[in-house]
């Protein structure tokens, strides 16, 4: 297989800065628009800290909110939030390139390089084709999801309102955002009113999964269909890890939670919590009623997140898969990390280790900080920081009651979780590569 030429460090660094700047400007514009009286249902100005938190959460497709989306925001405000979700989920650079193409502007190598870094594409070649595929696939899946949800929501909320609810929840689910409009029944209730509705739960879960496995994987599926051997190693890892992370936690939840419920509802709740925990942000049951063991498993799932090049956040499934494979290679005393009869580059193993370390430090340090600031139990605060950092949007009910310093911490975590910790570091720190290697000396570990 022909190897793509590696980009210069300065070029990659500039690409990462453009990506970060794009997200920052989108958040700022969204926050200012949400401050307008027309954005709120009461036609009053919403305080900037609240609009900023909402804009960060929507752009970073998280789902944590300080104002109930259905009751506080007007139709215009909800449309702004949905726009932020759509752009944030698909990527600021993806939307920017699409608009540039529609305006007839020529896309140069520099723009293609930024797009490559934005969606974690393996090479610059074919990036415009991939951009078209992303836009087309997203539109088809979201409209299909809205059509599937419309019979239920039109029945429950009326025709026009039902269509809007169907579109909103379809986009929110596919983008793994977790924003909902069910506050009309009970504020901050998410999908608990449909917790025992198999049809709605199934459609939402399918939307979450399709958005979370990544556009590169969907490109493989579209090109090679059922010929799994022709898939990229990335796609094979993604599909295997996704299946494992759906069914194993679901089995755990089935035996540890919801023991007093009928069998069908127990299976439904177990599957839904397993799927939604990995950055989707919807909940069909009261999470505060779960055992601490169940909350701990959900926190781990939130930190793992979805897949690279997808609408989801978190460390990514491929990161965890590479780390597990690296551990197995050490246990088996093998020099290379192998999977599906392929070797995984050492750079990927090092990057995975760095990502895990960064997420662990951010997760623990900010959880401890919020616990001290708010005088709340550490486990509850860690659930909140894990949700923000993994851009999951699930909460045990403390988000609205937190002070401004804690909200600032959560906003920083959501931003870092969406753009990626390594992206932030690469954008800020110059490369330390040296032309020569230093002397080697062994260090005992373990």
Image: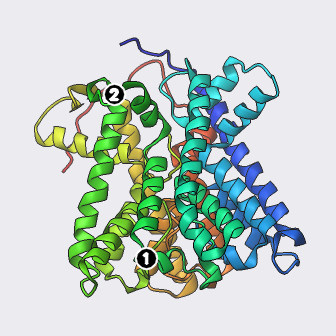
Q: Vertical placement of 101 versus 245: above or below?
A: above
Q: Vertical placement of 251 versus 25: above or below?
A: below
Which residue does the numbered mark 1 point to in the structure image?
195
In the image, what residue occupies the spot 88% across and 77% down? 43
Nearer to the camera, 157 or 427: 157
Where residue 199 appears, x then y in whole percent?
42, 66
Query: How many numbered dots are placed on residues in this image?
Result: 2
Q: Secondary structure at mark 2?
A: loop
Nearer to the camera, 170 or 153: 153
Which residue does the numbered mark 2 point to in the structure image?
231
- Relative placement, left or right, of 339 versus 417 is left
Q: Nearer the viewer, mark 2 or mark 1?
A: 1
- Relative placement, left or right, of 129 versus 232 is right
Q: Going by the picture, which residue comes out furthest to the top?
A: 2
Q: Vertical placement of 347 versus 198: above or below?
A: above
Of mark 2 and mark 1, the one earlier in the sequence is 1
In the image, what residue occupies the spot 49% across and 26% down? 433
Q: State the image quarter where residue 217 is shown.
A: top left
Say whether residue 303 is visible: yes
In the image, what residue occupies the spot 49% across and 71% down? 394
Q: State the image quarter where residue 168 is shown.
A: bottom right
């Amino acid at each position: 297989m022909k190897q793509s030429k590696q980009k210069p460090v300065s070029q990659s660094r500039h690409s990462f800065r453009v990506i970060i700047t794009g997200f920052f400007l989108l958040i700022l514009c969204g926050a200012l628009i949400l401050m307008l009286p027309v954005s709120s249902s009461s036609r009053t100005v919403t305080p900037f800290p609240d609009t900023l938190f909402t804009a960060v959460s929507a752009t970073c497709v998280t789902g944590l909110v300080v104002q109930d989306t259905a009751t506080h925001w007007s139709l215009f405000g909800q449309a702004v939030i949905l726009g932020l979700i759509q752009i944030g989920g698909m990527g600021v650079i993806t939307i920017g390139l699409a608009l540039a193409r529609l305006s007839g502007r020529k896309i140069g190598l520099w723009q293609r390089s930024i797009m490559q870094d934005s969606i974690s594409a393996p090479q610059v070649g074919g990036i415009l084709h991939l951009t078209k595929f992303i836009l087309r696939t997203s539109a088809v899946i979201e409209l299909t999801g809205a059509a599937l949800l419309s019979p239920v929501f039109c029945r429950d909320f009326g025709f026009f309102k039902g269509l809007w609810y169907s579109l909103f929840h379809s986009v929110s689910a596919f983008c793994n955002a977790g924003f909902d409009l069910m506050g009309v029944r009970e504020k901050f209730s998410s999908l608990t009113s449909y917790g025992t509705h198999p049809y709605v739960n199934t459609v939402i879960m399918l939307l979450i999964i399709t958005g979370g496995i990544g556009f590169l994987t969907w490109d493989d599926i579209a090109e090679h269909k059922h010929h799994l051997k022709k898939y990229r190693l990335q796609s094979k890892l993604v599909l295997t890890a996704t299946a494992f992370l759906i069914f194993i936690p679901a089995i755990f939840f089935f035996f540890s939670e919801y023991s007093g419920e009928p069998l069908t509802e127990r299976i439904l709740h177990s599957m839904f919590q397993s799927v939604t925990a990995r950055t989707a942000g919807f909940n069909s049951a009261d999470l505060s009623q779960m055992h601490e063991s169940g909350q701990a498993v959900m926190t781990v799932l939130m930190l793992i997140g979805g897949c690279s090049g997808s609408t989801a956040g978190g460390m990514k499934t491929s990161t965890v898969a590479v780390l597990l494979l690296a551990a197995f290679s050490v246990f088996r005393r093998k020099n290379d990390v192998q999977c599906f009869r392929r070797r995984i580059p050492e750079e990927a193993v090092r990057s995975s280790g760095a990502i895990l370390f960064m997420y662990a430090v951010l997760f623990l340090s900010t959880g401890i900080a919020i616990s001290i600031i708010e005088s709340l139990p550490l486990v509850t605060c860690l659930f909140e920081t894990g949700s923000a950092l993994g851009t999951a949007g699930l909460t045990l009910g403390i988000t609205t009651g937190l002070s401004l310093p804690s909200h600032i911490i959560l906003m920083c975590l959501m931003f870092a979780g969406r753009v990626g910790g390594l992206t932030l570091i690469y954008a800020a720190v110059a490369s330390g590569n040296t032309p020569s290697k230093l002397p080697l000396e062994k260090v005992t570990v373990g």
